[in-house]
Image (cartoon, rainbow, N blue to C red):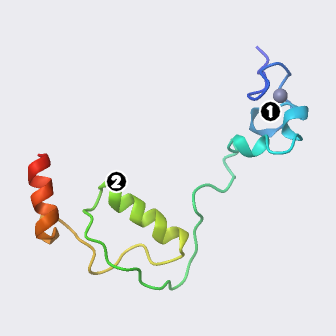
Amino acid sequence: MIPVCKHCRKSKVNRPRGLCWTCYYTDGVKELYPSTSKYARRGVGNFTGNAPLPEPTSYLPGSPEKMAVLELRAKLKQALWHPLDARGAADVPPLAAALLGRAG
Ligand SMILES: [Zn+2]
């Protein structure tokens, strides 16, 4: 089976990202489809060296809020971890603990 273009679903795929020639070179189309190459840059990038410390967060490790904080820190090229970040239930501020208790 010959794969068809992800965008127009008519032409044969002959460009990267599963697109046909026409769609790939049409302004704005290829940006709609992520690269399928294993060598492509993904996420917000990586860097080495010392990075400035971010503001500490009280969000718990593994929570969606903490993941968002980590993403933001990476975008801002800050250190991902702060020594005063919350590490477990004991570090949750009283208000957050009350809210968590009510939810569970
Ligand atoms: Zn197409």
Q: In the figure, 62 relative to 81: above or below?
A: above
Q: Is residue 55 left or right of residue 45?
A: left
Q: In the figure, 12 relative to 42: above or below?
A: above
Q: Is residue 84 left or right of residue 50?
A: left
Quadrant containing ligand 1 reads: top right
- Name the element at disc 1: loop
Q: Amino acid at mark 1?
A: Leu
Name the residue tied to disc 1. Answer: 19
Q: Position of residue 95 (x, y in %)?
A: 13, 66
Q: Residue at x 37, y 80 (%)?
A: 55
Q: Residue at x 80, y 45 (%)?
A: 28
Q: Residue at x 89, y 41 (%)?
A: 25
Comparing marks 2 and 1, which lies closer to the viewer?
2
Q: Does the closest atom of ligand 1 sit within 8 Å of the Cβ of label 2?
A: no
Name the residue tied to disc 2. Answer: 64
Q: Amino acid at mark 2?
A: Pro
Q: In the figure, 2 relative to 75: above or below?
A: above
Q: Quadrant of residue 26?
A: top right
Q: Does the closest atom of ligand 1 sit within 8 Å of the Cβ of label 1?
A: yes
Give the alpha-carbon distance from disc 2 to disc 1, as whole Å. Answer: 33 Å
Q: Residue at x 50, y 86 (%)?
A: 50
Q: Residues within 10 Å of mark 1 (few under 14, many from 20)?
A: many
Q: Earlier in the sequence, mark 2 or mark 1?
A: 1
Q: Position of residue 59 (x, y in %)?
A: 27, 65
- Name the element at disc 2: helix
Q: Nearer the viewer, residue 68 or 4?
A: 68
